[in-house]
Image: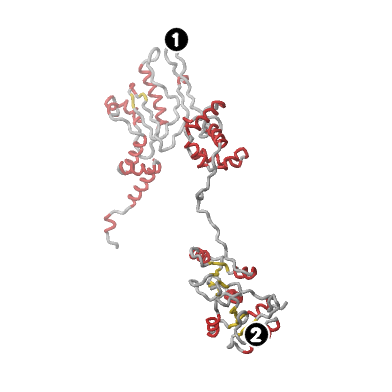
Amino acid sequence: MPIFQDAHGMAIKFFIQKDIPQEIQAEVCETIAALGGRVEPKVPRAGFVLVQPGTTEEERLRLCWSTPERPERYFVPYTYVDACKVSGMLLKQIFIHEGKPIRMHIDSSIANVNVRAALSTRIMHSGGDPTASAQLARVILADPNTEIFQHLVKTYQGEPEKYVESYLWVKKCIEKGQVIYTPVVYKNPGGRRPGEERTQFTEQDEEHLCNWIAAKIPYKETGGRTGNRLYQQLCEMAHDPEFAWVTRHTWQSWRERYKKNATRLDAKIAQIVDQKKPAHGEKGQYGYVRKPEEKPKRVRKKRSPMNADTDSPIAGPSTVHTMETYSVPMPVPLPTLTGVMGPNDTFSPVVYSTPPPVFHHMPMPTPVTGQMDAATARQNAREEEMEDDEEWQIREGDAPTPAWAKRKADDEDGPNKRARTSPTAPPLHPIDQAVHDIAREFRFTVEEVQEYYDKCGDPERTKNRFKKMRDVLNALPDDDEQSRPSA
């Protein structure tokens, strides 16, 4: 069947705009006749009016003859004839709404000029008007791969009679022979719909819940039954076939079920616990973790037994009280040795500003009886102190000599010297002593050093800081040198 014949075999009628060039009119007439159509000298009631888009005569023809009473009268560009010939079929006029061409706007996001021109021609061949502005258009065509497309969708999604479509939408509509706008999919904003019932809890659900709580928190007094994590862990077990039932509710629902029915469910949990009798902290219970390994304790050797003959401790290596070496990280307060026996049985306090040394052969003060007289005991104690003093020496540089290093000189000077070195105030804390030493060594105030130490908590860092500051101050030129004119 020829293209320009209807279902009854009747020729389709055409009217050609009069001011179109005669050469074009003759070619169009020849093509129409070859395809089974007929050109009329007047505008037909049903058929096609071939116009030249953008001309005054085209506008006049549309105003005069485009009426709702003639829905089967279509206005198309004269190239419509060749388009039908190329496609091998009569192109349907689908882009029509309420008897008028659907106004369309081709957005600038479609950057290719040739694509825009082809799209415009295809729309006109199918009855649409591609020349409308974005505000007046019913359909806006844009490139879906650009941000502009998403912006247009958001801008016009609230207008019911305006649609934003991809430029490929025109081809799809022509192939299907009808206009089908991209459907709007409902997106649930959340919450239950009115009248919709949520999944109800069953007795089996409560039984599962009670068994879970009984296994994880068998004794309520330990706490945790209303915490979030217990029920989040429950829902994390959904991958286990034995816990497939947890998917019936969210973890929030399981938690709320227990909270609102705690008294009744606690009784059921107590019955389950009474049957299984789990112990506190049994493996698998909620809140219990593996206990960390215990650190080995320091071993102290016991003092040797008393001499059976003299009832006095045996002198020598057997009486040594040994301690293991240990270290304390700063800025944790360091241990303090309360004192040692000084010459003439005087007690001199000793304070450490660094971790204590290993104590080797430090004798404990004991009463002198039997074979050993007081002078010998005092001399032995002094010799042992001197050995330990050498090990205890911790001052460096031009720091003051520790008090215990002066005891030998004190003995030579007499009792007045010993009285002067006796403490009249409680010894300083090791940290405070370190701060005072730094302030004295680098000639800064104690308050300045203390303020910086409180910030960093590291005595070595504090010392380096004020050493650098003193070096910088020493390197500054005198005022006289700065004011002296250059030669």
Where residue 111 sits, quadrant-wise, is bottom right
Q: Could you tell me how far apart the alpha carbons at marks 2 and 1 are, in whole angstroms?
A: 149 Å
Within 10 Å of disc 1 (Cα), the crowding (few <14, some 14-19, many 20+) is few
Residue 95 in the figure: left or right of residue 468: right
Q: Which residue is mark 1?
A: 309
Q: Identify the residue position indicated by label 2 in the image.
A: 39
Q: Which residue, as the protein is rendered here, is positioned at the far right?
A: 1
Judged left or right of residue 50, residue 154 is left
> Secondary structure under badge 2?
strand
Task: State the count of labels.
Answer: 2
Is 170 on the left or on the right of 435, as rendered? right
Secondary structure found at label 1: loop
Q: Is residue 453 above or below residue 417?
A: below
Amino acid type for the residue under numbered disc 2:
Val
Q: Quadrant of the C terminus?
A: bottom left
Residue 219 in percent (x, y) is at 50, 29
- Residue depicted at 55% across the width and 83% down the height: 61
- Which part of the image, by quadrant, shows the N terminus? bottom right
| Viewer-side label of 2, 1 | 2
**Percent from the top left, x then y, of residue 263?**
47, 32
Q: Foreground: 386 or 326?
A: 326
Residue 271 horizontal/vertical position (percent)? 53, 27
Amino acid marked by disc 1:
Asp
Furthest residue toward bottom? 22
